[in-house]
Amino acid sequence: MQAAKMTRAQYGVLIAAMALAAAALVWMGQSPDPAAASQAQPPTQGHHAPPPTKGSETFQFTYPDQKRLPAELVFDPTPPPPPPKDKKVHEYTLVVEEGVEHEVAPGIKIAAWTFNGQVPGPILRGREGDVMRITLVNKGTQPHTIHFHGVHPAQMDGVFELVPPGGSFTYEFVANPYGVFPYHCHSNPASKHIHNGLYGMMIIDPREDRPPMRELSMVMSAFDLDRDGDADFYAWNGRAFQYADHPIDLQQGEPVRMYVLNIFEEMMAPHIHGNMFQLYRSGTSTKPHELTDVVSLGIAERAILEFKYDYPGPYMFQCHFSEHMELGLMGWFRVNGTEKKADASPAKPAAAAGHAGH
Ligand code: CU
Ligand code: CU
């Protein structure tokens, strides 16, 4: 677009668009933190802004102590246990609120829209063939819904039954099939409702339990603070770098089952270091599809990864897209040795920074 050739009408549209963008920033409640401001870069030609430089330098996992997330903010990645087999109805209540302060990266707070005050929403769990009964309570100012993936009647699909502010609605369906599923708001515009934080993971167990293991649940998402079409932060479970500062302790030889969901509109590639995993695509089989160490997940795709560590020490788990990793989609497994005196603490995660990514 050449300014010299712009008509008065085109100028009008441009000014209006700029005003809208400014209003959106105010509406997001973005903090005036200079670090946050550095994320807002002027638009360049083409869809993509230049590679993140300031952002990734500021927020690499070697960031200084004072910027680290307080422990109480860390999202507990442990899902609820598999439900008892004689429990035939699984009930949850999800309360929607808007403008909930959410620290998406150390020192960076956004006004999120949340299920039960958190991003991602709570991990829901049920069993194949049982009734899922989930009540949405809308404490926001606009209509919301919950759309579940999986098999269910049209009137339980969370597209038509908009729940007005102050209202509530109970979704009920028979959980089918077993697997890992996203749930998210489907109110218009869905991109805004989802991007603002209204999403989560639902785990449906098979009738016969999978072998008991240490379990982790990980939702991959991203946050575009200035709404320029390029995400500014990427995260496991809603906060950039949270498992870098607060590594997840594992035991050497301990079997681990990790449920992973990509809810962002880009490809993600979950990858674990120093190990391979059995891959169960969509979690809809009890037989693994593949032994690998990385898998590509498109939007809303999910998988179960099963692995155990043979050697103690700190291991990165990350998205293999380097930009995603540098902007928050990484963390540490701290694998503790079974032998006495084995020191598995990632005493200096910063020292490993040079090897990040492989
Ligand atoms: Cu909504
Ligand atoms: Cu969906």
Image (tube, rainbow, N blue to C red):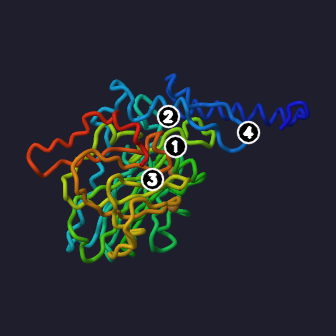
Q: Earlier in the sequence, mark 1 or mark 3?
A: 3
| Callout 1 secondary element | helix
Q: Earlier in the sequence, mark 1 or mark 2?
A: 2
Which residue is tagged 1?
Answer: 323
Q: Amino acid at mark 4?
A: Gln
Q: Amino acid at mark 2?
A: Ser
| Callout 3 secondary element | strand
The label number, if any, that marks residue 199 in the structure image: 3
Q: Earlier in the sequence, mark 4 or mark 3?
A: 4
Q: Position of residue 266 (x, y in %)?
A: 55, 53
**Which residue is nearer to you in this view: 60 or 26?**
60
- Using the image, determine if residue 64 lies above or below residue 255: above
Locate residue 206: give its quadrant.
Answer: bottom left
Q: Are there few (<14), some (14-19), or many (20+) residues within 10 Å of tag 4?
A: few
Residue drawn at x 54%, y 29% as measured from the top left: 54
Q: Earlier in the sequence, mark 3 or mark 2?
A: 2
Q: Are there few (<14), some (14-19), or many (20+) residues within 10 Å of tag 2?
A: many
Give the CA distance from mark 1 to mark 3: 23 Å
Q: Position of residue 278 (x, y in %)?
A: 34, 67
Q: Earlier in the sequence, mark 4 or mark 2?
A: 4
Does residue 31 appear in this view? yes
Q: Position of residue 40 (x, y in %)?
A: 59, 31
Which residue is tagged 2?
Answer: 56
Give the CA distance from mark 4 to mark 3: 32 Å
Name the residue furthest left.
340
Locate residue 45: give its quadrant.
Answer: top right
Q: Are the residues at dot 4 and dot 1 in contact (C-beta closer than 8 Å)?
A: no
Residue drawn at x 28%, y 69% as measured from the top left: 89
Q: Earlier in the sequence, mark 4 or mark 1?
A: 4
Give the CA distance from mark 4 to mark 1: 19 Å
Say whether residue 57 is left or right of residue 271.
right
**Which residue is nearer to you in this view: 20 or 299?**
299
